[in-house]
Amino acid sequence: MELQQLKDRNVKSVNLNGIEYFDVKDIKDNHPDLKVDIKKIIIIRKNVYITAENIQEITEFDKVFKGLFKA
């Protein structure tokens, strides 16, 4: 996903060593229409972050698949 798109959606982020990282907890809690590549997350001081290129919008397939496991 594009960096500016995530900033426009107000996804929390931090800049570490010149690289913009996005808060995975914020994505999980406040942006259910986004998904992250869990193989690409980094953990810094107990916080979980990911770069913009490893975040995507969920697809219709994702929505159906998610719906199968709701209690």
Image: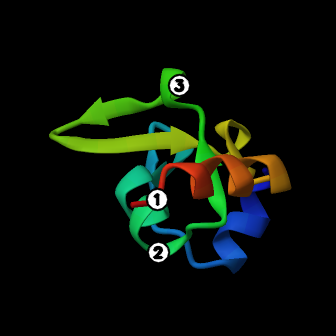
Percent x, y of residue 54: 66, 36
Residue 54 vertical position relative to residue 58 in the rendered view, above or below: above
Residue identified by numbered label 2: 30
What number is the disc on residue 40?
3
Quadrant in which residue 5 is drawn: bottom right
Residue 13 vertical position relative to residue 9 in the rendered view, above or below: above
Which circle, 3 or 2, is nearer the viewer? 2
Give me the C-alpha separation between circle 2 and circle 1. Answer: 18 Å
Q: Give the residue type at disc 3.
A: Lys
What number is the disc on residue 70?
1
Residue visible at 42% across and 51% down in the picture? 24
Q: How many marks?
A: 3
The answer to whether residue 57 is left or right of residue 69 is: right
Which circle, 2 or 1, is nearer the viewer? 1
Percent x, y of residue 17: 45, 37
Give me the C-alpha separation between circle 3 and circle 2. Answer: 20 Å
Residue 11 vertical position relative to residue 14 in the rendered view, above or below: below
Q: Spot the residue most to the top.
A: 39
Residue visible at 54% across and 70% down in the picture? 11
Q: Residues within 10 Å of mark 2 (few under 14, many from 20)?
A: some
Residue visible at 53% across and 25% down in the picture? 40
